[in-house]
Amino acid sequence: MLRIIFPCVFLLFGLPGFLTAAETSGPRFRIDNELRVEKTGTTSKTTTIFSDGLVYDWIAENGEITVFDKKNDSFALLNPELLLQTKIVASEMKEAVELTRKEMEKHENPFL
């Protein structure tokens, strides 16, 4: 689940400025990523594609896909293996993240 949520949060907070210029027919390019966890030696490979105002993020290990659509303020989470699709409205996600952040600030453990 975290493999889906992390890209969503990253896309939600990290890309809005870039996508403003690419609403309908902006630049088209891809980024191939490899994340390696040193302690365990595991790796995760993803491909991110920017095309026509949409951002597609594909996780190689499990085939899961996240699609960010700025125009409609939404994420689509796709799991082809299980034939599941979920749509999340970005503004609702922002509210949930903010509520969680406020709750974590009250926690005794400062590293939480």
Image: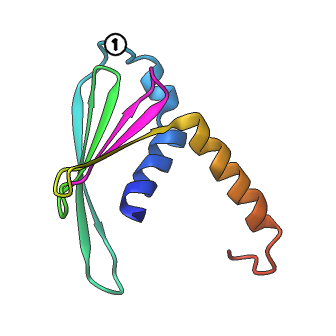
In this picture, is 8 found above or below 112? Answer: above
Q: Residue 75 in magenta? A: yes
Image coordinates for residue 5, horizontal then vertical, percent: 44, 55
Q: Which residue is mark 1?
A: 24
Q: Residue at x 35, y 22 (%)?
A: 53
> Which residue sits furthest bottom?
39
Tell me where the magenta segment starts and ends, as one range: 64-77
Q: Residues within 10 Å of mark 1 (few under 14, many from 20)?
A: few
Q: As rendered, which of 81 and 60 lies closer to the eye?
A: 81
Q: Examine the image and state in which quarter residue 51 appears.
A: top left
Residue 100 position by quadrant: bottom right
Q: Is residue 108 left or right of residue 34?
A: right
Q: Residue at x 29, y 13 (%)?
A: 25
Residue 92 or 82: which is nearer the viewer?
82
Position above or below: 111 against 100: below
The C terminus, quarter of image: bottom right
The quarter holding residue 75 reads top left
- In percent of width and height, residue 32 lies at 21, 49
